[in-house]
Image (cartoon, grey):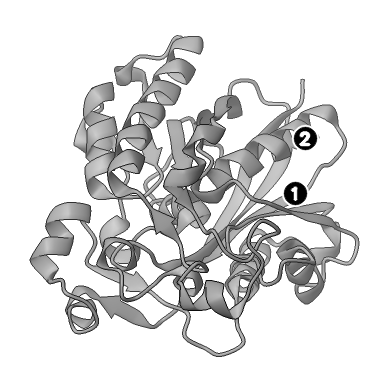
Amino acid sequence: MLNARISGIAAYTPDDILDNEMLSKMVDTNDEWITTRVGIKRRHILHEEGKGSSYMGIKAVEKLLAETGTKPEEIELIICATSNPDYRFPATASVIAYQTGMTGAYAYDIQAACAGFIVALEDATGYIRSGLRKKIVIVAAEKMSSMVNYEDRATCTLFGDGAAAVLVEPTEEEGVGVRDGVFHTDGQGLEHLLMEGGGSVMPATVETVKAGKHFLFQDGRNVYKNAVTDMFTASKDVMERNSLTVDDIDWFVPHQANLRIIEAVGSRLGIPNEKVLVNIEEYGNTSAASIPICLNQYKDRLKKGDKIILTAFGAGFTWGAMYLVWDL
C-alpha cells in the first residue's frame, strides 16, 4: 500500500533581524517583558521593497530541489500554505512554480493560517495514497511583517518572516511516513483572530486603512486558551488512535506560536521538555512556516524511524495534529 513520506526539507529566513531591543525603541516594551510572556528574542524580517511571501518560498524551494537532486520539471504539484499571499489572486503557488521552473506542476494555495503546513501535508498525503501524484512540493511562506501593526505591542512582538519547503513522495515501506492526522475547524473563532479589511466583507477604502483594519487582530487571551486546549486534545486523540504513549514519542513539534503555549501543551501531554522541539526564540511566530522551519533546523537530530507528533492551531479556528514516522 502506498503511503506518503517527507523525502526532503529546506528553509529560508531573511538576513535582517528585529530583536527585542530594537522593538523597545518602536513600542512601549522591553526585552524582559517580551521574553517572559512569549519567549521570543529575535525575528527575521523581509525588508526589501517589492518582495513578498513568494520570494522566500522560491528560495526555500530552490534549496529543496538542489539538496534532493530533484529537477523542477519532475514536480507534479505544488501546494503553498500562506496567510500572506503576494496578491488576492493569482495563487502564490503559481508564482513560485513559474519562478522555479516547475513547468509541469499544478499549483494552488491553502489558507489555514498557522495550521497551513499540516493541512497541506494532509492534502499531499491523500494525493500520494490515491496514486494521483508522485512528487509534491509543499511550501509554507509567510511575510508576517506585512500584516503586523508595529504600534501594537501585543502583536508586533510575536511575528517573524520565513519559508520552508518539503518534498513529499510515495513509499511502500511499512510503518514509515505520514501515519495519521486529526483536523478540526470551528468558525466561532472568527472574531478572535483575523484581518478584517481587504476582503469582500470590508473592501479596502481610505477609511479602513486609517482605522488599521488591514493589520492582524488577535484577542490574545482567547487565542491562548483555545490553542492550548485544542492542540492538546488533537495531539492526545491522534496518539490514542494509534496506541501511542508518551514514551513511544521521540519528538513533539508544536506550532511555534508562543513559548507559554508550547510549554502548556507539552506539560498537559506529559511530554518531557527534551522531546519538544522549539526555535521560537530565534524566529518568532512564522505562522504556517513555523513547523517546517523547526523540523529543518533539527533535521540532523532526527533519525529514520523516529515517531513524531506535529500539532498546530490557527485562525478560524483551525487546528489539528499529525503522527508521522521520520524517513529521511
- Whole-angstrom CA distance, mark 2 to mark 1, is 8 Å
Label 2–label 1 contact, CB within 8 A? yes
Identify the residue at image location x=77%, y=66%.
89
Q: Residue furthest left?
A: 32
The amino acid pointed to by label 2 is: Ile
In percent of the image, x 54 and y 76: which residue is there? 207
Question: Which of the numbered marks, if any, corresponds to residue 128?
Answer: 2
Going by the numbered disc 1, the residue's amino acid type is Ile
Specify the label residue 136 is tagged with. Answer: 1
Give coordinates of residue 281: x percent, y percent: 25, 60
Q: Secondary structure at mark 1?
A: strand
Q: Who is closer to the viewer here, 6 or 164? A: 164
Q: Is residue 328 visible?
A: no
Residue furthest to the right in view is 104
Can residue 235 be spotted in the picture?
Answer: yes
Depicted 74 relative to depicted 56: above or below: above
Relative to 206, is 194 on the left or the right?
A: left
Query: Which quarter of the rendering shows the C terminus?
Result: top right
